[in-house]
Image (tube, rainbow, N blue to C red):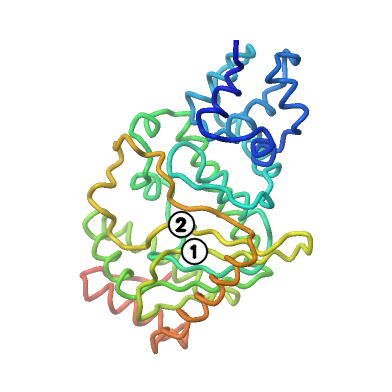
Amino acid sequence: MPHIISERLEEIGMTTNQLSCLSGVRNSHLNQIKNHNIKRPGRTVLIKIALGLSWGVDGINRLLQEYGESELYAPLDFAHFMEAIKARSTNSGYNAINPGKFNFEMVIMSVEKLMGDIKLVTPVPHVVFRDFEDYFSTDQVPLKEKKDEAYKSIRELLFNERIRMFDQNIKEHKVTHLVCRKCFESYVKDQKEKMSNDGIVKEFNKIFKGMRHENYDFKLINTCPSFKFHIREPNDENEKSIVVFAGTPRHPPSPCMSDDRENIGALIGFISNAKELNEYFKIEFERLSRFATEESTDKKDLISFMISFLEKNGIKVNLE
């Protein structure tokens, strides 16, 4: 009888070598497990493998139960997720990003764990300036998974860990962030329909606090990028520069992108350390930087401009 890991590898077109890179579990160890030669691989190894296979809660629980382990339990299993992130290699050429299950965090955090300078191009302020409930409520995951308490709890812990890593990184490394001015304005108007005034003010106070950090350079630009991306330049000489490409920044998203759509596993981006891609995105970042608005040359002027726009839209901001 084929092992469920072998079945999943065939289903998604992945090799054992690729799974080894994504899970951090040695190739030989994976083969021993697939050949039924290891009876109790251990909870950490099983969760690493399941995450490498892009399984959600149901798939993880199925693999755990196959070896007599209890179902996923948060927050105790969070440590296993962090082990999986630490073990995941970013030197495997390309890693796909899809919005469902835990795949997004596993891929993104494998890059965010690397300390170094960051170049960001996004349609809206960075995720670290939002509260989890606001972030999670608009996230592109099936409703069934959103309702699973273990899934939500671990996603929230991963979200908080992303904030912690960002805060740690910015203490010593530069973050340069470009945001389309029109997308920013659209974002404000869209948030006004979704959130209370207090919620919007709370979020933008976080943004303004971040903008005042000496290592955070935020700029509005007078052009809309074709896509959003993130360039990480690790200070570890053994790590190559990495680009994270994540689809289109157009905001608001297409009406087709509802939370309960069936084809939620569609590819939305990738990470790569390929030299040619990195060079292309660095050139594109420099090109976009030339479209910075006049206000973006001075942080105080830019914050004043953003506050003025908020107030024109009926959002009264009291700076903290």
- What residue appears at the point 60 percent right and 72 percent down from the top-left corner? 279
Rate crowding at label 2 as few (under 14), some (14 to 19) or many (20 or more) other CA atoms within 10 Å. some
- What residue appears at the point 37 percent right and 73 percent down from the top-left corner? 180
Nearer-the-camera pick, 3 or 47: 3
Q: Position of residue 282 (x, y in %)?
A: 56, 73
Q: Is residue 292 above or below residue 192?
A: below
Q: Gap between marks 2 and 1, in whole Å?
A: 6 Å
Q: Is residue 212 above or below residue 38?
A: below
Q: Quadrant of the C terminus?
A: bottom left
Q: Is residue 82 above or below residue 77?
A: below
The kind of residue on which mark 1 rests is: Phe
Say the numbered circle drawn on residue 75. Answer: none
Helix, strand or loop at label 1? It is strand
Helix, strand or loop at label 2? It is loop
For the image shown, how many numbered marks are present on the structure?
Answer: 2
- What residue appears at the point 56 percent right and 55 percent down from the top-left corner? 271
From the viewer's perspective, tell me whether residue 169 is left or right of residue 290.
right
From the viewer's perspective, tell me whether residue 25 is left or right of residue 259.
right
Q: Which residue is mark 2?
A: 246
Give the mark, 2 or 1, whose residue is nearer the N terminus. Answer: 1
The kind of residue on which mark 2 rests is: Ala
From the viewer's perspective, tell me whether residue 286 is left or right of residue 113.
left
Q: Which residue is mark 1?
A: 229
Q: Quadrant of the N terminus?
A: top right
Rate crowding at label 1 as few (under 14), some (14 to 19) or many (20 or more) other CA atoms within 10 Å. many
Q: Position of residue 109 (x, y in %)?
A: 59, 50
- What residue appears at the point 49 percent right and 73 percent down from the top-left corner? 211
Nearer-the-camera pick, 167 or 283: 283
